[in-house]
Amino acid sequence: MVRHTSGLAAGLPADDDVLLDVPDERLAPALVAAGRGEYEAAAKLLAATREAGEWENRDRYVTRLAAFARSRGEWFDDWRFAAPHDPDALLVKAELEVARGWESPARAELLREVTPLITAAAEGDPGDPVPWRVALDHARGTNASHTVFERLWAEAIRRSPHHYGCHVSALQYLSAAWYGSHRECFDFAERAAQDALPGSLVQALPVRAAFAYLTSAEGPGPAAKVPRERLDEAAGLAIALSHEYAADDPWPAEVRNLLIYVLVRLERWSDALEQLRLTGPYASSFPWDRISDDPLGQFLELRDGVRIEVAAARPLGGRGTGRGSRTSGSH
């Protein structure tokens, strides 16, 4: 095992080279400028995504900029003062306040107070689906009924039928941890993945459903048990999606990190090692922040554990496939 373990590090970056939540080349300058107290770069970036209809990028950038504004908000306060009706600033404000409300013990009450901000963001650009993703997150936190959820979902997909962020928010609402069930969650995820565009991250929804199931706090009873084959099929679909992107591509990094978690839980060690190689230096907070206060440390620790498991399954002098390994082609 010791002999094999060192060889299995091939293709994996050194621990010191692994980075957490790396911004892409467009977002990074906006964050640097915001760190200097300047909002113009962020405003220009979000305006460009809105004008070009880059809804997936827009969603990611809004989330990251709102998170930055929570810890260092002077630049954002200046932006809001200079352009109080800017649709991009309104959207960041809505995302920021929903995120704050989620962390409060009085979550439902605080989130209800945020409703006017979400309405303003949605009215800022009627064609933008991202405010409706925020609205779906808001609905989950305010104990909104299925009727309200379905109305919001219809508004979201009318604007962008394949928007990944809206699908993730809907999946969370339908999960057993919130207002649905494991079966409802998987059914929704599999239908969406089947209808997804080629290369769309929506194809990773079933592996998100698998994550929700595997991390279920209650521990599903026999009636709610999801068959192992369904979990493997979800992982297989995400593996196929991962192969559509180049190695070390930051765009699918979060999906790959999530897939690695699910593969480890399924004890598919060789498949997990392959995804670690494809992920390269791009660790993401999710899903590791769900199980550790040190997501980067958790990722690195798990990476070492996967190498040990694969090495342990290899016969001396031979080349094994790794215990629990399955190939994506079998799905």
Image (tube, rainbow, N blue to C red):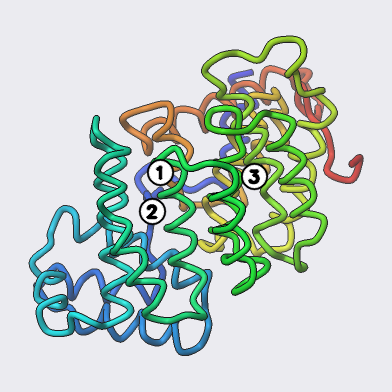
User: Which sits earlier in the primary sequence, circle 2 or circle 3?
Assistant: 2
301 sits left or right of 46 in the view: right
Secondary structure beneath label 2: loop
Residue toward you, 211 or 177: 177
Distance of mark 2 from mark 3, alpha carbons? 17 Å
Q: Callout 2 environment at 10 Å: few (<14), some (14 to 19), or many (20+)? A: some
Residue where numbered disc 1 is placed: 285
User: Which sits earlier in the primary sequence, circle 3 or circle 1?
Assistant: 3
Q: Amino acid at mark 1?
A: Ser
Secondary structure beneath label 3: helix
71 sits left or right of 209 in the view: left
User: Where is residue 181 drawn, in percent x and y?
Assistant: 66, 29
Residue 323 picture quarter: top right
Q: Residue at x 41, y 30 (%)?
A: 298
Q: Quadrant of the N terminus?
A: top right
Secondary structure beneath label 1: helix
Q: Are marks 3 and 1 in contact (CB under 8 Å)?
A: no
Q: Amino acid at mark 2?
A: Asp
Q: Residue at x 70, y 24 (%)?
A: 266
Distance of mark 2 from mark 1, alpha carbons? 6 Å
112 in relation to 63, above or below: above
Give me the disc on residue 275. Answer: 3
Q: Are marks 2 and 1 in contact (CB under 8 Å)?
A: yes
So how many labels did they put on this image?
Answer: 3
